[in-house]
């Protein structure tokens, strides 16, 4: 798959809430996931490797009490890179209901996502 096809497939699966399926299908074994600097202690940070990305997703899911809604934008593609905007209306365990939004930037190499990096306000 080329970058545009991968981007469209990621958006499709994310809109269906199939995040781990998207990772299994579209990510390289050595992919890395990068979060913003300045995260509080105990936050989910940077990881490398598909198994660690799966675990990061599971840990995030375990922090959720309820998902009330969300959205995923259409991708913007440039050569081997693409970005999407993601938003979630969630209730976090012990923290209440909140709206979360971020930009995800992805790098594709050899037909697989090799890097995801998220941009959002910390704090």
Image (tube, grey):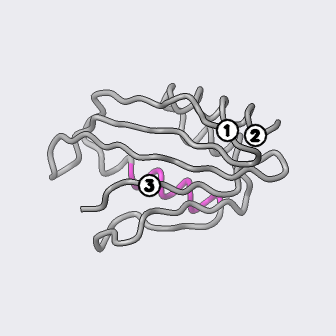
Kindly indicate whether the residue at mark 2 contacts the one at mark 3 (C-beta within 8 angstroms).
no
Q: Main secondary structure of the magenta part?
A: helix
Residues under labels 2 and 1: Cα distance?
7 Å
Query: Closer to the camera: disc 2 or disc 1?
Result: 1
Crowd rating for badge 1 (residues with CA inside 10 Å; few <14, some 14–19, many 20+): some
Say whether disc 3 or disc 2 marks the residue closer to the N-terminus.
Answer: 2
**Mark 3 → mark 2, Cα distance in angstroms:** 20 Å
Q: Which residues are magenta?
A: 50-60
- Given residues 85 and 13, the one toward you in this image is 85
Image position, residue 15 (x, y; %): 50, 27
Q: Quadrant of residue 120?
A: bottom left
Numbered tag placed on residue 12 in the rendering: none
Per the model, the C-alpha gap separating discs 1 and 3 is 17 Å
Tell whether label 1 touches label 2 (CB within 8 Å): yes
Q: Residue at x 75, y 40 (%)?
A: 3
* Secondary element type, mark 1: strand
Let me know if residue 65 is in the magenta part: no
The residue singled out by tag 1 in the image is 77
Q: For residue 3, which numbered disc appears in the image?
A: 2
123 relative position to 5: left or right: left
User: In the rendered structure, which disc, 2 or 1, sits on the residue that comes first in sequence?
Assistant: 2
Residue that badge 3 annotates: 119
Which residue appears at 72% of the width and 36% of the height?
Answer: 6
Q: Secondary structure at mark 3?
A: strand
In the displayed structure, does residue 94 sit left or right of residue 25? Answer: left
Position above or below: 59 against 37 = above
Answer left or right for 2 relative to 38.
Answer: right
Looking at the image, which residue is at 65% across and 64% down?
49
Quick one: label 3, few (<14), some, or many (20+) residues within 10 Å? some
């Amino acid at each position: 798959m080329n970058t545009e096809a991968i981007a469209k497939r990621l958006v499709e699966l994310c809109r269906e809430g199939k995040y781990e399926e998207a990772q299994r299908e579209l990510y390289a074994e050595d992919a890395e996931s990068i979060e913003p600097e300045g995260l509080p202690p105990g936050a989910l940070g940077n990881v490398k490797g598909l198994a660690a990305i799966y675990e990061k997703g599971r840990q995030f899911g375990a922090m959720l009490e309820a998902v009330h809604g969300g959205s995923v934008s259409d991708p913007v593609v440039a050569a081997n890179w693409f970005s999407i905007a993601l938003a979630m209306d969630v209730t976090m365990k012990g923290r209440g209901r909140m709206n979360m939004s971020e930009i995800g930037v992805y790098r594709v190499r050899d037909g697989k996502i090799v890097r995801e990096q998220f941009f959002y306000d910390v704090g």
